[in-house]
Image (cartoon, coloured by chain):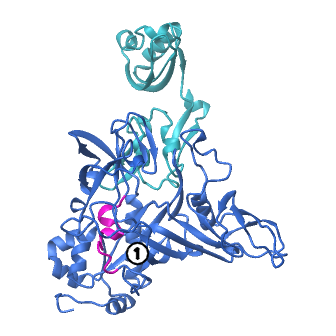
Chain colours: A cyan, B blue
Amino acid sequence: MYSKILILNFPPREAQKPLVCQLTKKYDLLFNILLAKISNQKEGYMVLEITGEKANFKKGVNFLKDQDVRVSYPEQEIWKDEEKCTQCGSCTAVCPTEALHIKRPEMEVLFDKEKCSLCELCILTCPTRAMGLFSKTPEEVM
Amino acid sequence: MGEYKINKTYEEINKKIEQGEAVVVTAEEIVDIAKNKGIVEAAKQVDVVTTGTFAPMCSSGAFINIGQSNPLVRTSRTWFNNVLAYSGVAAVDCYLGATQPCEDDPLNKRYPGEFNYGGGHVIQDLVAGKEVEIRAESYGTDCYPNRRIEKVVTLKELPNAILNNPRNAYQNYNCAINRSDKIKYTYMGTLKPEIGNANYSTSGELSPLFNDPYLKTIGLGTRIFLGGAQGYVTWTGTQHKSEVERSLHGAPLSPAGTLSVIGDLKEMSPQWLVGQSIRGYGCSLSVGLGIPIPILNEEMLKYTAVSDDQLFTQVIDYGYDYPEGKSKSYGQVSYAELKSGSIMIKEKKIPTVPLSSMVKARKIADILKKSIQKGKFLLGKPQHLF
């Protein structure tokens, strides 16, 4: 199984069409919507985690590109500086995907990178600035 | 003295500590010990119960003497890394407050403000041994002619630096929600609209003043863990209230007691004094604070044996009510519920968010326990009770 996070930008015209569902229908891919901003007549934006066979994944991505969807890969990752983190829990108020969560009863603040949707809300919410963006190496991106 | 079955004095307990024989447990450990052994037997066996808390405590700061220069100066305004300190004391003394933002901070002009650097951060940098840039101005006098000084110093080079916090260790605090339809950035953290979350900031059963609710052993001269060093209680803190509604166990049901504390900044550590940037609100300082509670009798044991399910606070709306000075309660919740991850408000399940670090609070209670066990930390007998 192959799994990857993709950033999709839909031009206003395409934002009205049912495109993403075709990934499942035509290419047997599963998608998990991590972030989405779509509204009629406006440019849309989606962050998807796509899982499936690698060959199908490539076909699916090409399909989206053919439909004028701009496809890019997250080149940055959210990172938690364990030295700086005081384990307070403030960040869990804003994290939309529960990537930042509290382990009970220890009350430790944990970060599950897999669940992170790169919304960046934690960066300025963390009172000790323990959360940051860091760039992946080109190999990691590909 | 005759009213209790167990009677111990500060002197007796301190003697046991010096001999390495004192029995010390944390305020979490005592809960089960008291359940299993009973209050009297537990009071007989245990000498000291340690507590701890680590959270933003905005009313904090340090008195700093920056040292004289040649020619002499009587500073009227002083900055540390461009953070203004109050200099209405003489001659090169000042008070650096934790919430003072850096002079060029855009504040909330770009809402919600980031508040990346302020007094709390300077204090953390100082205890971390970092170089800090000091700039001061004066109007000049016959005896102090110098009008402007600039220097780069570390904490070691400063003649005196005393952490002196006028209000710390709040005994209980509100649980904050937001009933409005807009996100609110408060000192209680980010509050999502339509009661999206409920934030609280107390270590519950580990919290110092929850373990001595009537301040029967905490007074002027009580020795405490403060910022990684040994500090002292100097007085009740500002906004201290004792006439409040209490539970059967004596614990206040809303914010009540506070403490004013003091300690030598030079002995403290950046692990326990951490600068805070609270989005849309301002700068602050998270302070690590712990108090050992001497088990003088079974009554004190009973207070320390209190557990999260017996400690309550009020749910307060920071969307509409709080800014208007209203403190209507939208429900009373226990710390056991708050720590579970969600509470029920108006039949809706609301996720809870802690702002106070339990991990660090536990560490403080544990450090305190170990230093008392090793005879390195003696009880400070209060010279005056409030």
**Residue under the image location 66 percent in, 63 percent down:** B130
Q: Position of residue B173 (x, y in %)?
A: 35, 58
Can residue B304 be seen at all in this image of the molecule?
A: yes
Left or right? Give the position of B69 relative to B86. Answer: right
Residue B216 drawn in magenta: yes
Kind of residue at disc 1: Leu
Q: Position of residue A36 (x, y in %)?
A: 44, 23
Secondary structure mostly taken by the magenta-highlighted segment of the chain: loop
Q: Residues within 10 Å of mark 1 (few under 14, many from 20)?
A: many
Mark 1 — residue? B368
Q: Position of residue A113 (x, y in %)?
A: 45, 39
- Closer to the camera in the image, B8 or B348: B348
Residue B175 drawn in magenta: no
Q: Position of residue A109 (x, y in %)?
A: 40, 50
Can residue A79 be seen at all in this image of the molecule?
A: no
- Classify residue B127 by image quadrant: bottom right
Question: Is B268 above or below relative to B114?
Answer: below
**Residue under the image location 28 percent in, 67 percent down:** B28
Q: Chain of mark 1?
A: B
Q: Which residues are magenta?
A: B202-217
- Closer to the camera in the image, B168 or B116: B168
**Residue under the image location 67 percent in, 52 percent down:** B103
Question: Is B194 above or below relative to B63?
Answer: above
Disc 1 on helix, strand or loop? helix
Give the quarter of the figure containing the C terminus of chain B: bottom left
- Closer to the camera in the image, B239 or B115: B239
